[in-house]
Image: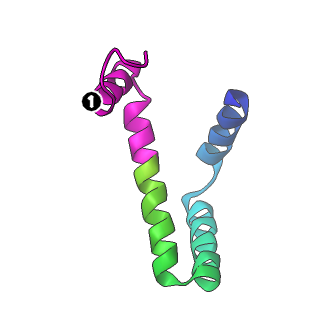
Amino acid sequence: MERFLTKLFEKLENTKAGTLCAFAFFIIGILICVFGFFKTLFIILFTAVGFFVGAFLFSDTGKFKKFLDRILPPGGVR
């Protein structure tokens, strides 16, 4: 999986910004046509939140353990 992501990011670095934006807005346009504006906005919002939460929590395992300790009582399960 890491090898796939590495190759994908290498290709994205060499791609022009216009092509990336055109592809992104094409996908958003299809989503709006299929689901409607507010459902598409909901999907995009939760995707962005999931990305930022995942990037924040999984960037450092210590942060993730502190987050779990705040949610779950420490010492019970682990």
Question: With 16 as the anchor, is 52 left or right in this view?
Answer: left
Question: Local crowd at mark 1 within 10 Å, few (<14), some, or many (≥20)?
Answer: few
Magenta region, residue range: 51-78
Is 25 rendered above or below residue 54? Answer: below
> In the image, residue 17 lies at what x, y percent?
55, 59
Question: With 59 as the anchor, is 19 left or right in this view?
Answer: right
Kind of residue at badge 1: Arg
> In the image, residue 9 lies at what x, y percent?
62, 40
> In the image, residue 43 lies at what x, y percent?
51, 66
Where does label 1 land, which residue? 70
What residue is rendered at 39% in x and 32% in y? 57
Q: Is residue 39 magenta?
A: no
Question: With 33 as the anchor, is 66 left or right in this view?
Answer: left
In front: 50, or 20?
Answer: 50
SS class of the residue under badge 1? Answer: helix
Tell me which secondary structure the magenta stretch mostly adopts. helix
In front: 7, or 39?
Answer: 39
What residue is rendered at 66% in x and 32% in y? 6
In front: 51, or 77?
Answer: 77
Q: Is residue 62 magenta?
A: yes
